[in-house]
Image: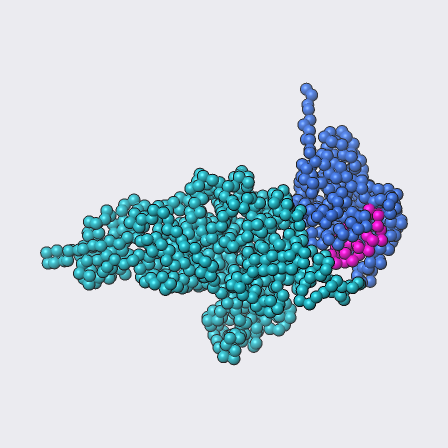
Amino acid sequence: MAQHLVTFHLDDPALGAHAPLRSVHVPTGMLLTEAARMAGVEIAQPCGGQGRCGRCAVHLTQGEVRRRSTLRLSAEDVAAGYALACQSVVEGDVSVTVPPQEKIERRLTTDRVVAEVEVPGGYDARTLQTIQRVSVSLTPPSLDDQTDDWSRLVTALRQQLDVEEVQVSLPLLRRIGQVLRETEWDVTAIVESNPQAPTARLQLLDLRPSEPPLYGLAIDIGTTTVSCWLVDLISGKVVAQVAEYNGQIARGEDVISRIIYASKNGNSAEMQALVIGTINSLIAAAGEKAKVDLQNVFKATIAGNSTMMHLLLDIPAASIRLAPFVTAINHVPPLKAFDLGLKINPEAVIDCVPGVASYVGADITAGVLSSGLGDDERLTLFMDVGTNGEIVLGNRDWLVTCACSAGPAFEGAGVINGMRATRGAIEEVWINGETLEPNYRVIGNAKPRGICGSGLIALLSEMFLTGLLDKGGNLNSSLMIVEEDDLHFAPPEKSAGSGVSLHGQTRRIRQGEHGLEYVVAWASETWHGKDIAITHVDVDNLLRAKAAIYAGYTVLAERVGVPLESVERFLIGGSFGKYINVEKAVQIGLLPDLPWEQFQFLGNTSVKGAYRVLLNHNERERITQIASRMTYIELSADNTFYEAFTSALFLPHTDLSKFPNVANALTKT
Amino acid sequence: MPIEIPKDKWPGSVKTITLGANSDGGTRTSVVTVGGEKALPFMHFEAETPYRPAVAIEIKDRKPDDWSTPLSEAWGDAMNDPAKWARAAEAAGADLILLTLSMTAVDGSPNTAENAVAAVKAVLGAVGLPLIVFGPGNAELDNALLVPVAEATKGERLVLGICEDKNYRTIVATAMANGHLVSARTAMDVNLAKQLNILISDMGLPLDRVLMDPTTGALGYGIEYGFSVMERLRMAALQGDAMTQLPMIVTIGAETWKTKEAKVGEGVPAAWGEWRERGINWETMTAITLLESGADIVVLRHPESVKRVKAAIADLMVAA
């Protein structure tokens, strides 16, 4: 097959003229994104290479490609030589300039104050922990006793512990003889016992000359963020908490995009490598922070949504997105660190938390466990808000669950000036009802670069209450100041640098490229020197996201015949949930109009659940029961969800009587 | 054995709305009142149906380029002059006239406010019936044409349309200022209809000056869905939901005469029957079906359909 030379120029201002050229020979028919990967050039593909987001646009400086789609490019862009890398088929030699790629900035959870994690009361490593240290003294072999090393060790372990069977891996078996002789037959065995196994069985994980400290990891793989806690298994204390963006983000921002990307030929191994790379860098960071030798990490408990678990294990995930939406596996058997290439003790036990369904995964069972929902007699609604909203309703007697696709709008995607909650994100907004001038707070006290989820919720609510938006989410064009050219009469007072007029109109509402928009920050205030505005398209996307979530929990409650008002506790998990302003979330109809004290924000309940499972074998048993107790309800099975969705596509809701406090607030303004 | 027919007693009722005015600036010789239902359509044994559904005939400010041949045959030369056309419509039995403004003039240039006002005035001068005026269906042009029309006809209680969720403010504002009514159109969905009524009422226009147009499909083109949405809207109204208690208007002619069955005379199976009769049947069947789902005003295009639909209404209005 014909080979073509593809040359990439990196347009990186930091490198200037020294920016390297990277060339690669590829066969006819290869996509530019694949060629870039071969050349080691990073091109972000937030939509997973479907040609929908336009973020992989590159500039062709020489040669041509076959464009499968130019959906996201204007005619001028195409004429100027721009092409979407994920839609460009190489059919000849070509030179490409790659614009600077959006750096995926890290915001470790340490950016905000990390609360000390409380060790569960009554934690006793000797009775609850599955990882144990056992000191054994063996009688050295002699001409009278020629028992083999392994039998000698097994016999000694059996004498100390009530076990029938001891298992060991081949790599460890190879080292046993040497360790026993070096320690003069006096060793510490690191073992994993499984108290749930019908016959007492031990797994030998390591042999040490002396007692090492024992560490474990609780990991949550989120679609957006991976969180990792390093835990001292003896005291139960969390010694380090780290978090970082999931390395797969560049291959799709939501689970569907990632499944599509991973389902393409050969990409699934790359997806696995990306998330394992993220986990390994987190493990290294945690180890360094707590000064822990990673060879002493003997166990990792991992939770995450079903797609993330499949991609972690490199198990085909395609069936998750196709009807009838089934996973390949919900209960993953125990694995070893070396199976996945995790950089901890290679014999360490990897325990994957069980999930329920394609869209209700291990992160949710972990959330149910850590929130205590399954043990409480009070009727509780638990919701994990992210790109997907997962909802669990019930108490200690029953649990039902559902998932709704909210879309990534609240995570900043699908909103023109949206961004993740990193430095430079506007996270809180207030608007003056008289002047319609906004005030905002930015993460890290930096110049604003965009608006994150909590900022978008606040913005929506403030715009609604000040009349900038009507209940349908339309920007109020009558508040727009018409420029002098269009006027038949003298313009209202206009002062430089301000959007205010005397007539309650504002220059901040204007006709932009995408229709009407409201300017939150003028170019002079922002990091990139461009206005930050929210457009009517953004508002529509946000309304759809909030309507999906509202419809999700109302329909779930309806299905089981429980009025929403009888829900006694409303628990919100997900790192997104941590920073939402309840009042504003109620005002836009994202959360129901219940007394505020009923809402509780729990942060990352998934990693908390993994932590409890890591420490306590009884919790492991309980989470398996929780997973099997949860009844999954498919919302798309009939049209009640759609009805609830369209009635929630309004501010705060078509039926205002469901939001009495918002109705009050509206009559006051 | 005597059989007792079970009767539903509904807590709510549809608002009564009068179109057209004969005083305070109004020059109509007849007005049309619709609404006021306290039961599902034609359930006379449950509650009186105070006003019979009205039939409007749709005309345009100039001869349309895309209307089906049976329609141009039926109206003939009258289509070249809105005043004549309106008189012909009145003669054909219209209770009221719907005048749809064209997107462009005959030469292809955009329609102007002057043209629109002249056409509306001509129709008002020609007939004494109440008038509904729809813009061409482009938000910007609708606003540019309807505002001068509303101002030039202050007090006539015209119905102005089409208000949609993304473009209702200007039309509602001018209707409020000039004593007119509005027609609010939404895609076929109960919630969307309700939402638009809320938005309009939030602007301060009393709901007894709003007609709702829930959109419908012609026979064979989604009429079941349209029927169901209208039926659910009406039941919500009767159950007491104030935001759905508005009379409903449906543009049946426009929907019907764009279907292949009504529009195409050649190259269709012989079993479809005679073209003209088929088109009229299509329009009549669609209208009568939707009257049963609660339509208060049906807008038709063919004079023969008007005759048949009016006869059907007369029959339906007789209590058994």
Which chain wears blue?
B
Whether A467 is among the magenta residues is no
Q: Identify whether B82 is placed above or below A628.
A: below
Quadrant for residue B318, please give it: top right
Looking at the rendered image, the quarter that the N terminus of chain B falls into is top right
Tell me residue A171's x, y (percent): 27, 61
Tell me residue A626's x, y (percent): 42, 44
Residue at 76% across / 34% down in the picture?
B49
Q: Nearer the viewer, residue A474 or A432?
A: A432
Tell me residue A529's x, y (percent): 60, 69
Residue at 81% across / 59% down in the picture?
B111
In the displayed image of the protein, which residue is found farthest to the left?
A144
Q: How many marks?
A: 0
Give, as a single range, the part of the protein colored magenta.
B133-162
Q: Identify whether A633 is placed above or below A234.
A: above
Looking at the rendered image, the quarter that the C terminus of chain B falls into is top right
Left or right: residue A51 versus residue B284 is: left
Q: Nearer the viewer, residue A526 or B193?
A: A526
Quadrant for residue A407, please give it: bottom right
Q: Nearer the viewer, residue B206 or A443?
A: A443
Whether B138 is among the magenta residues is yes
Whether residue A446 is visible to the viewer of this picture, yes or no, is yes
Which chain wears cyan?
A
Q: Identify whether B8 is placed above or below A150.
A: above
Tell me residue A325's x, y (percent): 49, 50
